[in-house]
Amino acid sequence: MTPEEQRVREYLISQGEKYPFKQLWTRVIAARLELIKEVSDVTQSQADFSFHKDEWAISEILEHVINSTSRVTDLISDLTSGGIGDSSGIDPPRELSHSNIDELRGQILEGAFKWTAMTDNLPDTPNMENNSDHGFFGDLHAGGWYMFQRVHDLDHLNQIRNNKSHADYPNN
């Protein structure tokens, strides 16, 4: 684990232990709302734009975030209820998106609603002893995974902003 990954890991674990989920919710949802706002006016040609073969298009980023959020939501629910949690496939690889930008915007918003419902349904005294492995950050408890979603959304928000700031980004 790199020093940066270790620093993030410590942040995820400490914040996830220090605060109840309903207090952490504002941080996670703030990041998601920023991401939603960032893509609110993206056109289909802009969503499909990639400035390099190794760089993800906005549509691919959104598809990834949608799929990952669903898996993290399930993982947190499982861990907090004492389950062992399955973190495989949490960070799905790059895939070509087959959804249009309007569908993706709807799905990313729906993910925020599901996140809120999941948070509301978490136990007041969750199990924080069970861990599940993250490929970069090692074993995380439910609170660490909860905060991971914030970090994940912000990383991909920056990736979207990077695409949008490129000189070749389409005007419409």
Image: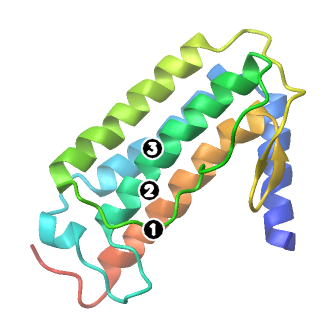
Taking the spot 80% from the left edge, 49% from the top edge, the residue there is 11
Relative placement, left or right, of 141 versus 117 is right
- Assign a secondary structure to mark 2: helix
Can the viewer see residue 27?
Answer: no
Relative placement, left or right, of 32 versus 58 is right
Can the viewer see residue 122?
Answer: yes
- Assign a secondary structure to mark 3: helix
Q: Position of residue 144 (x, y in %)?
A: 76, 40
Taking the spot 23% from the left edge, 67% from the top edge, the residue there is 47
Give the alpha-carbon distance from disc 2 to disc 1, as whole Å: 7 Å
Which badge, 2 or 1, is on the more N-terminal residue? 2
Q: Report the number of discs.
A: 3
44 w.r.t. 107: above or below: below
70 w.r.t. 151: above or below: above
Relative placement, left or right, of 136 versus 44 is right
Which badge, 2 or 3, is on the more N-terminal residue? 3
Q: Are marks 2 and 1 in contact (CB under 8 Å)?
A: yes
Residue at numbered disc 2: 64
Q: Residues within 10 Å of mark 3 (few under 14, many from 20)?
A: many
Q: Quadrant of residue 103?
A: top left
Which badge, 3 or 1, is on the more N-terminal residue? 3
Give the alpha-carbon distance from disc 3 to disc 1, as whole Å: 20 Å
Q: Residues within 10 Å of mark 2 (few under 14, many from 20)?
A: many
Q: Position of residue 152 (x, y in %)?
A: 57, 54
Residue at numbered disc 1: 94
Residue at numbered disc 3: 32
